[in-house]
Image: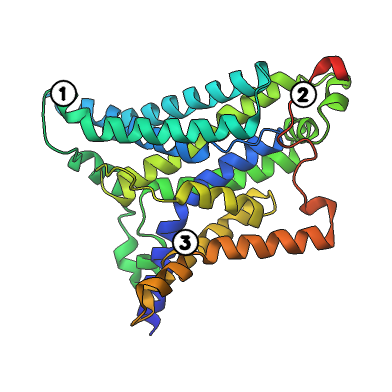
Amino acid sequence: MITTIALFLKQAIIQGIPLLYGSTGEIITEKSGNLNLGIPGIMYIGGISGIIGGYIYEFSGAELNPVLLILIPLLSSLLGSVLMSLIYCLLTVTLKANQNVTGLALTTFGVGMGNFFGGSLSSILGEGGTISLIETGKAFKQTLPFAKDLGLFGETFLSFGFLAYLSIIIAILASVFLNKTRKGMNLRAVGENPATADAAGINVTANKYLATCIGGAIAGLGGLYFVMDYVGGAWTNNGFGDRGWLAIALVIFALWKPHTSILGSILFGGLYIVYLYIPDLSRSSQEIFKMLPYLVTIVVLVVISVRKKREHQPPQSLGLSYFREER
């Protein structure tokens, strides 16, 4: 029984890591007032960019360096994710386009680009066959050397690749930044009331650009984790499923607090796979269980709407373009 619970907890953490990356990135973005519904697409781009970088290096014919096996896909993923975020900023911050429409368009674009390159990269480079980065996957999945010596505890909590622990560190740092630093306070001021922040001398445009690009880069790491650690260096078209949307739902569940999303991601990860641990479920019953993370999010939305506590509400200017001439 204990072994089964430990196994379930481990799998819940594994499933929750991409959600934690996505939600942390989106929280930082939304604190600036930008509602980026392109997070699912950015996660796809983060994943496929890492695959492209890793593929070019692993099959370059050069002697493989363990550091470069990690560094090249990591930088490629960050670059692809930031470029997607810059497109979003250009359209919504500079050109004042509708944030909802822009985000959805980026998601469609990101998924399409990921599936295109994932399905044809080998052919484009003249190799043929499917993408399988065995050595790169091994580098990303490398666990702590002493994990096996700590029995069930080590197997449950210490047997992950470095990206899993990095996600928790980033979430904690994001929480500290938003709540304990002056620049974090400025960012939150921009999300709450950009006109007042602008009048106080805070650069609204720069804060929105930086928050969205940094948030997008973090979200893209969720895609990199999925393809390199979870899958092991392979690409499957549409393999992400609805994880990007779950990450956005987790933002609401965590009440826009990065540190809360750590436990929330494990909960969502557990709800996402709990049907696998319930015997004799029909297909229709499995689909009902897959809805649990969304149902939990709806309940949280209802509760915070009824209680109306300001600290549990989204930024007041979330999703709204800022026109300085209307200040």
Residue picked out by circle 2 = 322
For disc 1, the neighbor class at 10 Å (few under 14, some 14 to 19, many from 20) is few
Q: CA distance from mark 1 to mark 2?
A: 47 Å
Task: Kindly identify the amino acid type of the residue bearing the numbered disc 1.
Answer: Ser
Task: Kindly identify the amino acid type of the residue bearing the numbered disc 3.
Answer: Gly
Residue picked out by circle 1 = 60
**In the visual, does 227 lie left or right of 208?**
left
Which image quarter is the C terminus in?
top right
- The residue located at (36%, 47%) in the rendering is 226
Which image quarter is the N terminus in?
bottom left
Q: Earlier in the sequence, mark 1 or mark 3?
A: 1
Q: Earlier in the sequence, mark 1 or mark 2?
A: 1
Dots 1 and 3: beta carbons under 8 Å? no
Q: Which residue is farthest bottom?
A: 1
Q: Earlier in the sequence, mark 3 or mark 2?
A: 3
- The residue located at (80%, 40%) in the rendering is 316
Mark 3 vs mark 2: in front = 2
Q: Based on the displayed image, in which of its 4 quarters is residue 3 positioned?
A: bottom left
Vertical arrangement, residue 325 with respect to residue 315, above or below: above
Q: CA distance from mark 1 to mark 3?
A: 36 Å
- Relative depth, front residue between 123 and 31: 123
Q: CA distance from mark 3 to mark 2?
A: 36 Å
Dots 3 and 2: beta carbons under 8 Å? no
Residue picked out by circle 3 = 269
